[in-house]
Image (spheres, rainbow, N blue to C red):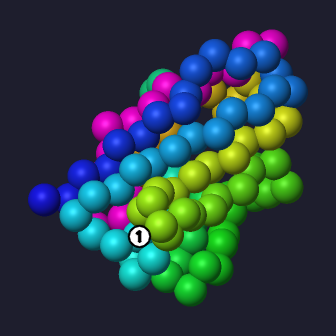
Amino acid sequence: QVQLVESGGGLVQAGGSLRLSCVVSGIIVRNNDMAWYRQAPGKQRDMVATINKWGVTNYADSVKGRFTISRDNANNTVFLQMSSLKPEDTAVYYCCVQNSRYWGQGTQVTVSS
């Protein structure tokens, strides 16, 4: 049984930082392409960052230079470090196994101006 559990969301002021965590069970993170997506109210779900099995990362243009995706192989966890947060970063953030049906339940990030 594959499970992805996100945590770390919350309310933060513009310019602040948050670190999201995604604890994964049932698959080995380092053997899979992992990703963070986000969905704002009334908008589609968009890719934020990906990390493939070789550790190569990719980011949406809107977060480049501000967000960093990483993984902890020992703890089978994927992280999203978010800095210089903006109100437009407000969304529910989801962790997933790329190109699969495996998604977490999401964690809310709210950035106040």
Across and down, in percent, residue 94 comes to 44, 44
Q: Residue furthest front?
A: 74
Relative vertical location of residue 98 with respect to residue 48 in this rendering, above or below: below
Across and down, in percent, residue 36 comes to 51, 53
**Which of the two residues, 43 or 24, is positioned nearer the viewer here?**
24
Residue holding disc 1: 29
The structure residue drawn at horizontal position 73% and vertical position 14%, both measured from the top left corner, is: 112
* Residue 59 found in image quarter: bottom right
Across and down, in percent, residue 57 comes to 65, 72
Q: Is residue 67 left or right of residue 4?
A: right
Crowding near pointer 1: few (<14 within 10 Å), some, many (20+)?
many
Across and down, in percent, residue 48 comes to 60, 53
Relative vertical location of residue 9 with respect to residue 47 in this rendering, above or below: above
Decide whether residue 112 is among the magenta residues.
yes
Secondary structure category for the residue under label 1: helix
* Residue 29 found in image quarter: bottom left
> Magenta residues?
96-113
Tell me which amino acid carries mark 1: Val
The structure residue drawn at horizontal position 71% and vertical position 18%, both measured from the top left corner, is: 12
Relative vertical location of residue 5 with respect to residue 69 in this rendering, above or below: above
